[in-house]
Amino acid sequence: MQNIKVNLSRNSYMIKIGAGILDQIDDSLRSLGMRNKAVIVTNPLVKNLYGDGLNTHLMKAGLETTVLEVPDGEEYKSLEQTGRLFDRMSEFGAERSTPVIALGGGVIGDLTGFVAATYMRGIPLIQLPTTLLAQVDSSIGGKTAVNHGKLKNMIGAFYQPKIVLADISTLKTLSEAEVVNGLAEVIKYGIISDRGLFQLIEDNIEKLKLTHMDVTEEVVARCVDVKARVVEKDERDEGWRNILNYGHTIGHAVETVSDFKIKHGHGVAIGMVGAGMIAQRVGLLSAFELERIRSLIIVAGLPIKIPDLDIEQIMQAMRHDKKKIEGKIRFILPRNIGEVLIRDDISTILVQEVLRDLGK
Ligand SMILES: NC(=O)c1ccc[n+]([C@@H]2O[C@H](COP(=O)([O-])OP(=O)(O)OC[C@H]3O[C@@H](n4cnc5c(N)ncnc54)[C@H](O)[C@@H]3O)[C@@H](O)[C@H]2O)c1
Ligand SMILES: [Zn+2]
């Protein structure tokens, strides 16, 4: 088991990573002074796998609980579901001190986080992430949100959890496609900040795809550590936290133009190669390092090419991204594996050229 602290003065919290760690939930709640009631938010699939067991465990520990289900899918990360959860929580008698537990992937985590941030102006949030993406990314850092209309993560709040318990053994039931999706972010952490982690992923990629417990625990912990250190420096995403968007500038645009038929991890993978190509062409990254990035993405089972999509539409989508800075498109460019720079001065012509090469 590994414990990683996120240091944010009054908002500090622990992230515990290990196989079987969900069984420690009652101890964790007790140590946080939560002894009476708890709300569990999950979806039907995860409820069957882990929710019922978790609920029984908490009831045995003497807590009064309720399990609230949200249908499975990104479209349910909505204000409508937020309202439904508020109703059910108030029927249950949830108070300011009642913790709400998010059990599931990033969809459940983001929605429950937003509910926790806003119900009675904020109640304690516990994250129990059950996908690789949620364990290394969405459960940490306090970004909570729901979608609004066609806009992803439009309505939200910065709201840190009280604790995160990442039970690696829950990843065993994840489909290979979901594991691979999460691996894109895992590789990202190596490239932006931890060369040793990148090497570890290279050496163990097959084991990671099969969620071999020891390697997965080590890798998840290293990723969490990278994210925690970045969030500590820039909790509200005003500068340095941008580096977590490596691969996301092109990635988001590709996802959007594909009408979200391309999965997030796939978009990020293509985007990481694209940003790597830009970095190489402006003289930051060596051809050798770029090849290492490309090769790892391929063996992870992720794409490196833009499928049949219109390059001009991708350019347009990048210009409309909410992260752009005064008309400039912001890129996170690797200088080496393990080190990136934030750059706002990349010419449109170079970006178009790289997109065309990514489409070939
Ligand atoms: N808040 C943040 O900082 C942040 C960062 C990255 C992504 N996100 C958000 O995260 C969401 C994506 O998260 P995701 O990739 O986890 O998707 P997800 O939550 O939709 O989960 C993917 C699928 O796996 C299933 N599942 C979950 N745990 C399982 C398990 N242990 N075994 C079997 N199946 C399981 C889910 O039911 C779902 O069908 C997006 O909404 C994205 O915007 C947020
Ligand atoms: Zn991402």
Image (cartoon, rainbow, N blue to C red):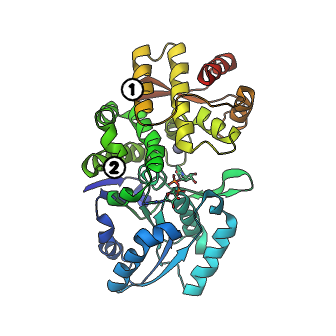
**Residue type, label 2:** Thr
The answer as to whether callout 2 falls within 8 Å of ligand 1 is no
Does the image show residue 190? Answer: yes
User: In screen coordinates, is 120 left or right of 284?
Assistant: right
Quadrant in the rendering for residue 309: top right
The answer as to whether callout 1 falls within 8 Å of ligand 2 is no
User: In screen coordinates, is 246 left or right of 314?
Assistant: left
Quadrant in the rendering for residue 209: top left
Residue 224, disc: none
Q: Above or below — where is 153 with respect to 51?
A: above
Q: Above or below — where is 206 with respect to 35?
A: above
Which residue corresponds to the image point at 34% horizontal and 71% vertical from the top-left?
Answer: 25
Q: Give the secondary structure at mark 2.
A: loop
Residue that numbered label 2 is attached to? 211
Q: Quadrant of the C terminus?
A: top right
Does the image show residue 342? Answer: no
Query: Residue 171: x and y, percent?
Result: 38, 56
User: In screen coordinates, is 24 left or right of 124?
Assistant: left
Camera-nearest residue between 261 and 236: 261
Which residue corresponds to the image point at 39% horizontal and 78% vertical from the top-left?
Answer: 34
Residue that numbered label 1 is attached to? 337
Which residue corresponds to the image point at 33% horizontal and 32% vertical from the top-left?
Answer: 202
Q: Give the secondary structure at mark 1.
A: loop
Alpha carbon distance from label 2 to label 1: 24 Å
**Residue type, label 1:** Ile
Query: Residue 124: x and y, percent?
Result: 47, 70
Query: Residue 191: x and y, percent?
Result: 41, 31
- Nearer to us of marks 2 and 1 is 2
Q: Quadrant of the N terminus?
A: bottom left
